[in-house]
């Protein structure tokens, strides 16, 4: 049973890391919305905080924190950037000389 | 947006937009603040002599010297969009040679966070007060001394402000007989 679990985990990891950089279309839109909302919110909060403390530096520090947070949340291909992962059907792997890879006029006999 | 570098670029570019917006809003909020402040200036031990400027022409020129007391509170000038003041004491006078003469005789830089309430007593001049030629400062009875300052903002206008107040200086004959 333990061996089975390890096997499953290895399969999942292989499947995931095999295209680890990948995010799908809806994930791209979600990433853009996320960092825009986070950066604008941190800019507004930072500006108000800078006004209250009479220091532009404090405001810029808050904005930098927002930039760091949005970088962490949207730059690596997290699972929330792959909402279509289960809808997309991927083709099974083919051998190099598989006839499906060649156009019809070059079909190998 | 489909690669890590393109998302990094997008986050950075949008962050710069937000930073620009914050800075511009700060400029709009602070550009209307009145930056003039009153100051008290008193002159002591004023005298005038003829001397040769080591960095100037060979002919002797009028040289005035005095000490001054200056009182000015610049604390209200350091709002959130002002990082530095460059203050200088300017002598303005008229001679038979030139209608407008302006000589800086002392200056001081105040950074944000430094002591900004100045109470200076009996301070000598920082720069030599040479006239352009001889005979201009001798018995000149209307030399206006005023404090000016540049305000250096984080974002906005680099302004030259003339402080409210100032004093007038009257000089006599040459102190030394040696000409």
Image (cartoon, rainbow, N blue to C red):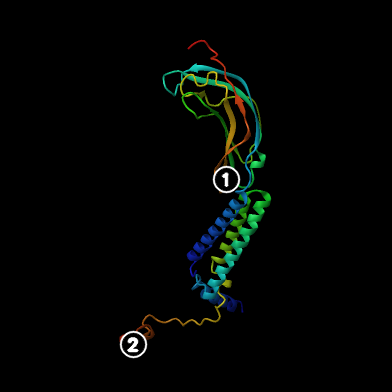
* Residue drawn 51% across the image and 82% down it: A89
Give me the disc on residue B153.
1
Give me the disc on residue A104.
2
Q: Position of residue B81 (x, y in %)?
A: 60, 47
Disc 1 on helix, strand or loop?
loop
* Residue drawn 57% across the image and 19% down it: B171
Q: Dividing the picture into quarters, in which one does residue B106 lie?
A: top right
Q: In this view, does A96 lie to the left or right of B61?
A: left
Say above or below: B155 vs B143. below
Q: Dividing the picture into quarters, in which one does residue A70 lie?
A: bottom right
Extreme residue toward the right, this view: A52
Extreme residue toward the top, this view: B177
Q: Dividing the picture into quarters, in which one does residue B86 lie?
A: top right
Circle nearer the viewer, 2 or 1? 1
Say above or below: A31 vs B153. below
Q: Position of residue B151 (x, y in %)?
A: 58, 41
Q: Position of residue A100 (x, y in %)?
A: 38, 85
Q: Where is residue B105 in the image (x, y as percent from the top left)?
A: 55, 28
Say above or below: B166 vs A19. above
Chain bearing mark 2: A
Q: How many labels does the image show?
A: 2
């Amino acid at each position: 049973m333990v061996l089975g679990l390890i096997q499953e985990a290895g399969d999942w990891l292989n499947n995931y890391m095999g295209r680890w950089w990948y995010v799908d279309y809806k994930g791209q839109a979600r990433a853009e919305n996320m960092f825009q909302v986070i950066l604008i919110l941190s800019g507004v909060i930072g500006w108000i905080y800078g006004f209250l403390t009479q220091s532009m530096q404090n405001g810029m520090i808050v904005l930098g924190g927002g930039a760091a947070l949005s970088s962490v949340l949207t730059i690596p291909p997290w699972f929330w950037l792959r909402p279509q992962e289960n809808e997309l059907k991927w083709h099974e792997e083919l051998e190099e000389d598989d006839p499906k890879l060649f156009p019809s006029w070059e079909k190998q006999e | 947006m489909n690669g890590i570098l393109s998302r990094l670029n997008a986050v950075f570019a949008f962050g710069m937009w937000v930073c620009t917006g914050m800075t511009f809003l700060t400029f709009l909020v602070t550009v209307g603040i009145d930056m003039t402040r009153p100051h008290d200036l008193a002159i002591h031990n004023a005298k005038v002599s003829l001397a040769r400027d080591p960095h100037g022409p060979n002919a002797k020129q009028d040289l005035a010297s005095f000490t001054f007391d200056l009182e000015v509170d610049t604390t209200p000038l350091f709002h959130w969009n002002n990082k530095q003041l460059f203050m200088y004491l300017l002598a303005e006078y008229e001679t038979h040679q030139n209608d407008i003469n302006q000589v800086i005789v002392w200056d001081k830089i105040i950074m944000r966070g430094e002591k900004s309430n100045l109470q200076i007593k009996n301070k000598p001049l920082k720069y030599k007060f040479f006239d352009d030629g001889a005979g201009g400062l001798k018995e000149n009875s209307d030399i206006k001394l005023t404090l000016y300052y540049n305000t250096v903002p984080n974002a906005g206008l680099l302004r030259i402000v003339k402080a409210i107040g100032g004093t007038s200086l009257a000089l006599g004959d040459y102190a030394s007989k040696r000409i």
